Amino acid sequence: MAKKTSKTAKKGEISIKNVTKVYDPTGVNVMAVDNCSMEIAGGEVCMIVGPSGCGKTTLLNSIAGFHSITEGSIHLDGELLCGPGKPKAEQSAERMVVFQHGALFPWKTLQENVAYGPTVQKAMSASEAMDKAGHMLADAGLGSFITKFPGEVSSGMARRAEIVRALINNPKVLLLDEPYRAMDALTKQIMHESLLETYDRTGVTIFFITHDLEEAIFLGDKVHVVTTRPCQLKKTIEVKIPRPRSFETQSSEEFRKLLVEVNDAVHEEAVKAFKAGEREMA
Amino acid sequence: MTNFLQKLFGNTTGRRGVSAIIVFVIIWHVGSQLDEWTGYDMLGIGLVPPPADVFVAFLGVVPKVGYWMSWVASFSRVITGFIVAMIIGIPFGLLLAVNRYFRGVFFPPFEILRPIPPLAWVPASLIFWPTNEMSIAFVTFLGAFFTIVINVLGGARNIDISYLRAAQSMGASQFDLFWKIVLPGTLPSIFTGAAVGMGITWEVVLAAEMISGGGTQGGGGLGFFIWSSYMGGSLEQIVVGMISIGIAGYLSSSAIRKIGYHFMPWRRLF
Amino acid sequence: MSNAANTRISEPQGIDMVFYRIKKNFTSVDPYLTVFGIFLWLFAYWVLCEGLQIWRFSKLPGPVAISKDWFAFEPFQGISIFTQEYYEHIRVSCQRILIAFGLATGLGVPLGLFMGWSRKVRDYVFPIIETLRPIPILAWVPLSILLLPGFEGPVIFLATLASFFVTALNAMLGVDSIDEEYFRAAGCLGSSKWDVFKNVVVPGALPFIFTGLQISIGVAWFSLVAAEMVSGDLGLGYLIVDAYMNNVTVPMVIAMITLGFIGYFSSGCVRALGNKLMAWHVKELAQQGR
Amino acid sequence: MSTPKTITKASSSAKAKKLTSSLVELKNVSKSYGEEWASDNVLKNISVEFPAGELTVIVGPSGCGKSTLVNLLAGFEKPDEGRALIDGKEITGPAKDRMVVFQETALIPWQTTLQNVTFGPKMRGDKKGPSLVREAEDLLIKVGLGEFMNKYPIQLSGGMQRRAELARALINEPTVMIMDEPFRGLDAMSRSLMQEFFLELFDENQKTNIFVTSEIDEAIFLADNLVILSNKPTTVQTVIKIDLPRPRNYKMLTTAKAFKYRRQAMELLHGEALKSFAVLK
């Protein structure tokens, strides 16, 4: 198992049991998730890989409390988030989401954005929160940008600030929904290194959705490959590359072997999803 | 029909909407009668005729030829002004968009004249044009013209440059670029402009009919219908006139939507 | 061939930047075209109305006649920049617009925001607004004259009504335009309902609100002029009709031009206020090169 | 300077009508744009050769002026200095011998897929009537859009739009295809499928291909030659010859040889990427 910092003993353990989600938007039932179970240990980086539109996001949304689930249950540290009799989890700062398109409030500066959480939760006074936000942003290498609006900085910087905004609340779990999707490979690389550095510092549990295989292996402790819709667990691959990892890791022989393994599992699903997508359009 | 009813009552939004309108009519009724019942006037709407009286008045005017003649008169004014504005406005806007020199010379005067409210032109045009009818047509034209030009200009200048480049590298001539790319690319804004322009046109026609007293030569119009009801002190007929104009305006803007739908098949698919 | 690729020019600062922009502006053909265009237009106007006096153009006052009267101590036809009356009309119109626009904004923006934010409010209020909206504002003129007392009441009512619809609808669309993810993010961060309204709904809808306000002030002027023309005792719209009735054409045109200026100025004010309140939006657009 | 090579590669496609491809060269090209003081935005003294019938991939960090390079090659812009040549002749403007597939899809939204594909020949008038329509239909079937000919671009998925755009370019029988990050915005999986599809097309046509991207894997997977750009100012850093066998499939990317190329490219580019982010730390 990867090296963990000691302060995160038993924190952010997620257990997903037999979760099923059926949508009914137009009278036609669509099954997004079908009897999906997985266990995520506290302080683990769990990567979910699967074709787009396969229901991965549904899983994340039900953990975060945006969607209800139809069957099954989800527990966090033994506490029921949602399950029988309680279809929808409540939203809470212990489970922070970083969104696909970025959801820093464009009308607040980076510092105000980061300070927002503690302020509205009344965990700190406004000025304390602003101070702390300033420090945390500076630690993330954004010190000279704290008074800028998100629209003024590059997407990479905005994404870093968004992760800082999540972390200032000391969440148990960080839920990331393809946060680096729109970035080019080189920017992504830098973002990965920065996220790993953050992880090594905080040891927060990370639930990360992606369909970039290299990203999955480079960041993760475990890679869960899921099938195309409805979303089911197809294969779990343990990544035993030691931390801290650097960009050289990505050209190691070990990495290459894992990539072959994941690639085979995913490619089949990708072709299936692609064909299904074409059929749906026609 | 059942389909329509189902759509209306089948969901919460529909039920709430219908009940809101019913409540609105009840308040209208109560408000108009309150003075009679209790002696207290509710916020000055005590003078408004109750809905039932309006309905009766409506039934009263429907068989009259004069009422329908006012529809015809107003509609023909609106359509004349509007069509002339389209015919002149669209090429003018496109020219402003594609030719830099044309824009440089003609855009500033256009911008200077644009903020003057169309109705402020009414007396001047009454003086200038030989007949009342022509001056109403002119002001109507002005009302729609500015809106249409601004929309056409904005739309044409916002066309994605990559369409132009793609067409160019496939060997399209300037002529083709204009007819195959610029014009269809501007269509959505043309229709937006037309819809807004149509609204303004109705306002202007009404005002012009009221101010010029419409009836003398032009044969009334809905604006004059309201105005003469006002002069005659028939409150029910005023409200009937208002509703009629509401319907007329609604009909003309849905006509524009229909036409737009027909001309822009690729926009239906959103 | 230029050597631009190899030379480095440092970015001009402060006043130098201003000079640079001015210089750059005047090396292009645009400002000359503008001057030429305005001159051409004035010249055509002069030729038609005063030079040749062809057809019915002779009935309209030309630019020379207008400017002579406008800037005269003792204007021939009653109105100039030195007469008290001129400013009185302007004052009255502006005062009415301020009241109407203020009322419409004060009522329309909150109503629109609530319509966008709460499904329930929208379901109940929106159908009523949609039923009333197709009725052109001017169709309300006789009714409002009958129902509301005095000259001020109807005029202000009409201008308010016109801009109220525009403002409320745009505020509602503004809330619709806010990405769902911002609401979710705010929820995750532990916001109360009120926090969401204050920190997401209001700022997120601002760009649309200000687009709406810009249109709304134009519409307010439009209806105000109409209302003043039909019923009124003072104001620029009244001045136009009054001049027409008294067969003096110069004050009529002066009032028209004045309306144009004030209308332009007032929408400029709304725009400036919007840009001040939405620094983030302006900077974002600038970043995208727009 | 080398003369245009004849195509020596084994051309698997017997049915290809005529194998026409051109040699494209940039000679000492410099170009600046934007305000004069923003001198980061320059291409500086770029000389690069795009051999006939080969697939050359240009890769560099984002914002390094790759799109400007495309504009120069396509003829939308002219270099400040130096020359852009096709078969030894100066590039003077956009023409049908160099078709561009754009970063954002440039399918004309008000034309159906079929109309989009027939647009070019119709405009020039060099192909007409039923034979043109048949040719376009064949091409669309080949790219897997047989059922989508009468749909508007908005009705197609991202991947389909890209394929329609490929068909629209190919019907003009260009000698050079210029691809400006054509698969950007597609998700990683559709992307890898599109890459395989694109290579099939390439193996069949053997046109000169210039492909711009910022993804290293994509670059190595596709390329015969890999041109790595460096940033601020933009110059050519290295050209790597990629010697992987064709036809290629997705498994080839995880071979040891590909990994060697990958490591080499990554080391070069990581430095460049950090340079772009230098402002951060």
Image (tube, coloured by chain):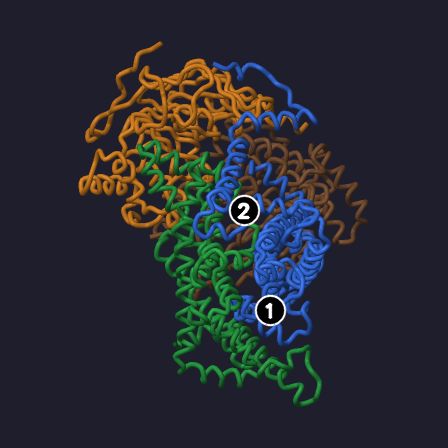
Q: Secondary structure at mark 1?
A: helix
> In the rendered structure, which amino acid carries the disc numbered 1?
Lys
* Nearer to us in this view, C71 or A236: C71
Q: What is the chain identity of the residue bearing mark 2?
A: C
* Nearer to us in this view, C259 or D160: C259
> In the rendered structure, which amino acid carries the disc numbered 2?
Gly
The CA distance from mark 2 to mark 1 is: 58 Å
Mark 2 and mark 1 residues within 8 Å of each other at the beta carbon: no
Q: Secondary structure at mark 2?
A: loop
- Chain appearing in blue on the rendered image: C
- Name the spot of residue A89 as percent of width and height, x first: 62, 60
Residue C164 horizontal side relative to residue B83, left or right: right
- Name the spot of residue B68 as percent of width and height, x first: 40, 75
Which residue is disc 1 drawn over?
Answer: C120
- Chain appearing in brown on the rendered image: A
Q: Is residue A254 placed above or below D47 in the rendered structure?
A: below
Q: Is residue B232 placed above or below A39 in the rendered structure?
A: below
Kindly identify which numbered label has been placed on residue A210: none
Which residue is depicted at the point 56% across and 32% down? A187
- Chain appearing in green on the rendered image: B
Q: Is residue C2 placed above or below B3 in the rendered structure?
A: above
Q: Quadrant of residue D257?
A: top left
Q: Quadrant of the N terminus of chain D?
A: top left
Which residue is disc 2 drawn over?
Answer: C62
Residue D269 horizontal side relative to residue A202, left or right: left
- Name the spot of residue B71 as percent of width and height, x first: 42, 72
- Chain appearing in orange on the rendered image: D
Which residue is depicted at the point 27% across and 37% down? D123
